[in-house]
Image (cartoon, grey):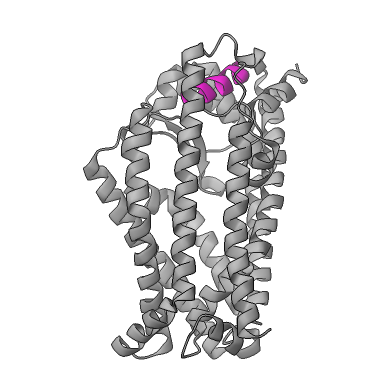
């Protein structure tokens, strides 16, 4: 392909992706039903159901504005050759491919974060505040943002340094070494995240002795599910929304309950939710995701190898110099359609896994109504959409729509 063809292809991908998001979100809003589904008749009053629909509409419009603005900025950067100016600046300031690459990536990261800050601030302190979800102070928002930046710089810097070094030193096998290095680094992060990263943002307190802890431990023993501890997380410092999850692998597994979840649910409901999470482990869903991630990383680096220092691709971006670090960025635009296809497949697999975990929870804890009630409470409390459009589900839903989950559970009773 020549530079013009590359340029038109990349612009088509960017604009096409933006149009796809617009179409999907408009279809999703059009699927809103003014009639409350029978399953939720006794759970939603008319005012709260209307509030949930307003919440979806406001978030949808906000997300579309953010998508359009971000896409427009990226297109202007490409057409005006701004990436070349950033590369010039990096080359003037520092020598060496790796250091220049880190500076170039740092400038891009800073630009993206500066674009994101006003959107994130508005979403948190206007939309989430308006609908009663936000509990975050401006101070917490600033400290969280700074922590995310530092983590992004450290983690991203380590990964980028390794990738650049391997492509500089290992020739045609560079994609293999990058694949192995990034995979090992991702697995390492899975292990250290519960002990090092997550406590930077939330406080984890061991669950106090009592009926809830006893019920959880009893269920875990019955399923031969070993855990290192049961913790409550102070999520109420940031949001009133609820959730629960497991962290860690092997003997380092921990159960984590949002404090908002504990406050709103009965013991049977909480154990049912945790039984669902145990189902993920029993079905080895996490290990399957890791295996899939390893394969997709390999595919990504294999294809990337064909685009390193591609003169026509660099000319499309008006670049004066070839570099490995800029190759990574430009390739990411071309990889977008493949990533979209992989995302569709992965979300479909995720929805299948959620049904399997639901089945496990119902058949092992044997309190299906408690689990249904828990799902309904989470849906109502979080103002979740009851009637998403099927295309929205295909593209974005890692969990099946709640009405379909409840229907599947009732078929087990």
Which of these two is toward me, 168 or 255?
168
The quarter holding residue 85 reads: bottom left
| Quarter of the N terminus within the rendering | bottom right
List x then y, in percent, for residue 10: 60, 71
List x then y, in percent, for residue 176: 64, 78
Q: Which residues are magenta?
A: 370-381
Decide if residue 373 is on the left or right side of residue 341: left
At a point 69% along the width and 42% down the height, the residue shown is 391
Residue 284 visible in the picture = no
Decide if residue 161 is on the left or right side of residue 222: left
At a point 43% along the width and 67% down the height, the residue shown is 156
List x then y, in percent, for residue 222: 63, 27
In the image, residue 263 above or below residue 28: above
Which of these two is toward me, 299 or 79?
79
At a point 44% along the width and 71% down the height, the residue shown is 77
Residue 76 visible in the picture = yes
Q: Is residue 357 magenta?
A: no
Q: Is residue 372 magenta?
A: yes
In the image, residue 271 above or below residue 125: above
């Amino acid at each position: 392909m020549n530079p013009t063809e590359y340029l038109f292809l990349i612009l088509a991908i960017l604009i096409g992706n933006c149009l796809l998001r617009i179409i999907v979100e408009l279809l999703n809003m059009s699927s809103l039903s003014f009639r409350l589904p029978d399953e939720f008749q006794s759970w939603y009053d008319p005012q709260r159901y209307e509030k949930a629909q307003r919440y979806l509409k406001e978030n949808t419009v906000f997300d579309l504005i953010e998508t359009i603005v971000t896409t427009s900025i990226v297109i202007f950067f490409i057409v005006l050759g701004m990436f070349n100016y950033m590369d010039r600046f990096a080359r003037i300031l520092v020598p060496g491919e790796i250091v220049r690459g880190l500076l170039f990536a740092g400038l891009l990261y800073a630009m993206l974060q500066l674009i994101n800050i006003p959107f994130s601030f508005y979403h948190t302190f206007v939309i989430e505040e308006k609908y009663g979800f936000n509990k975050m102070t401006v101070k917490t928002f600033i400290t969280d943002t700074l922590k995310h930046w530092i983590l992004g710089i450290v983690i991203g810097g380590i990964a980028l340094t390794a990738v650049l070094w391997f492509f500089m030193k290992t020739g045609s096998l560079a994609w293999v070494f990058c694949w192995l290095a990034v995979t090992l680094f991702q697995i390492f992060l899975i292990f250290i995240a519960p002990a090092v990263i997550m406590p930077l943002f939330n406080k984890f307190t061991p669950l106090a002795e009592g009926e809830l802890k006893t019920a959880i431990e009893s269920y875990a023993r019955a399923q031969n599910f070993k855990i290192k501890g049961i913790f409550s997380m102070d999520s109420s410092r940031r949001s009133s929304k609820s959730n629960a999850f497991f962290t860690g692998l092997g003997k380092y597994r921990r159960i984590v309950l949002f404090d908002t979840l504990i406050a709103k649910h009965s013991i049977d409901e909480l154990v049912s939710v945790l039984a669902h999470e145990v189902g993920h482990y029993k079905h080895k869903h996490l290990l399957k995701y890791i295996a899939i991630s390893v394969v997709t990383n390999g595919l990504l680096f294999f294809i990337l190898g064909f685009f390193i220092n591609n003169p026509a691709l660099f000319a499309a971006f008006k670049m004066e110099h070839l570099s490995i670090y800029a190759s990574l960025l430009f390739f990411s635009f071309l990889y977008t359609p493949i990533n979209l296809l992989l995302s569709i497949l992965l979300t479909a697999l995720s929805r299948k896994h959620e049904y399997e975990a639901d089945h496990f929870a119902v058949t092992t804890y044997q309190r299906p109504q408690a689990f249904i009630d828990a799902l309904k409470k989470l849906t109502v409390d979080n103002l979740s959409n009851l009637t998403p459009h099927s295309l929205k589900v295909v593209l974005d839903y890692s969990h099946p729509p709640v009405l379909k989950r409840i229907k599947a559970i009732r078929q087990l009773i």
